[in-house]
Image: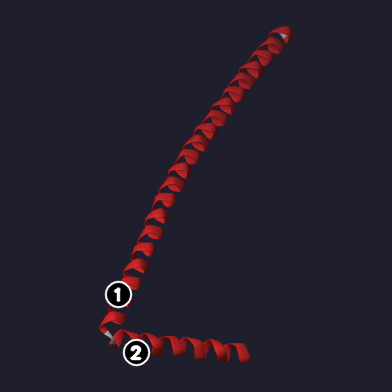
Amino acid sequence: MKNALWFVLGVAGGFVAAHVINKDPRGHEMLAEVDARITEFADRIGDAYRDQEARIEGLAADVKGVAADALQSAIDAASDVVDDTRETVVSATRSADERTH
């Protein structure tokens, strides 16, 4: 509780100090410069985040494409196995029928 009180007092003191400094023209200019630097920093961070997000989305799209191709290859291979098995069963059934007749 003691730490929370000190935190609240610190925040309140910071607001009061900023208000007093902002009244002086030199202080106003200094705070405007600090604000401009913070805005520039935030913009750079935002740009870097969007660039990274675009890279990740590109990688995710590539992975989805590769996975879809692999799935289609597996489906095609399974279909080929089913067709080959069907042909083998039909051939074996015909051979068995020919032996019994």
Looking at the image, residue 32 lies above or below residue 63: below
Mark 2 or mark 1, which has the lower sequence index? 2
Residue 19 x, y percent position in the rendering: 34, 88
Give the numbered dot on residue 20: 2
Residue 70 x, y percent position in the rendering: 54, 32
Looking at the image, residue 14 lies above or below residue 62: below
In the rendered image, the residue lying farthest to the front is 26
In depth, the one of 47 and 30 nearer the eye is: 30
Q: Which residue: 69% across, 14% down?
A: 92
Residue 83's image quarter? top right
- Image position of 85 (left or right of 100): left
Q: What is the number of callouts on the image?
A: 2
Evaluate if marks 2 and 1 touch, with contact meaning CB atoms under 8 Å apart.
no
Residue 57 x, y percent position in the rendering: 44, 47
Q: Which residue: 44% across, 86% down?
A: 14
Give the colour scheme of this rendering: secondary structure
